[in-house]
Image: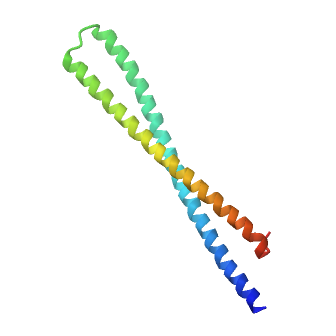
Amino acid sequence: MNEIMQKLEEHDKLFDLLTSKALEHSKFLDMLTSKSLEHDKLLDLLAHKALEHDDRFESIETNIAGLATKVEINKIIITLDTLVGMYKTNEQDRAMIAHGLRKTEDRVEILEKDVAKMKPVLGLS
């Protein structure tokens, strides 16, 4: 009888550990989701700004109609290069977060399967 109780206590400790780990992963997933939402907002802002800039570029082209100097063209190119760099950085961040999220989801699935296997043994199902 003592052996059974000891085994049950061991299983309780293991189950508590797995539950704790699952909660940690859940918090991590919440953080990743939050970051992903922040990046989505930033991408929306960048897309909106890009559209604004497109409109402004069209207006500039109409107004200057061939009067643009090399200096002005270089300023435009530098601005566009900066925007493209920001977009690439944001895309790379999103890719890294998505990868981390997939890894965490895979780990949570494994833990959930382990817990599901343990429940019948512990008489919890």
Residue at 36% x, 19% y is 56
The percent coordinates of residue 96 (x first, y second) are 46, 47
Query: Measured along the vertical axis of the image, is residue 15 above or below residue 24?
Result: below
Query: Measured along the vertical axis of the image, is residue 6 above or below residue 111?
Result: below
Query: Measured along the vertical axis of the image, is residue 3 above or below residue 64?
Result: below
Q: Nearer the viewer, residue 124 or 113?
A: 113
Residue 124 is at least partly visible in this image: no
Where residue 76 sits, quadrant-wise, is top left
Q: Nearer the viewer, residue 24 or 119?
A: 119
Where residue 83 sits, quadrant-wise, is top left
Residue at 61% x, 73% y is 17
Residue at 71% x, 87% y is 6
Q: Seen from this angle, which residue lies furthest bottom?
A: 2
The percent coordinates of residue 10 (x first, y second) are 67, 82
Where residue 77 sits, quadrant-wise, is top left
Q: Quadrant of the N terminus?
A: bottom right
Colouring method of the image: rainbow
The percent coordinates of residue 74 (x first, y second) are 23, 22
Q: Quadrant of the C terminus?
A: bottom right
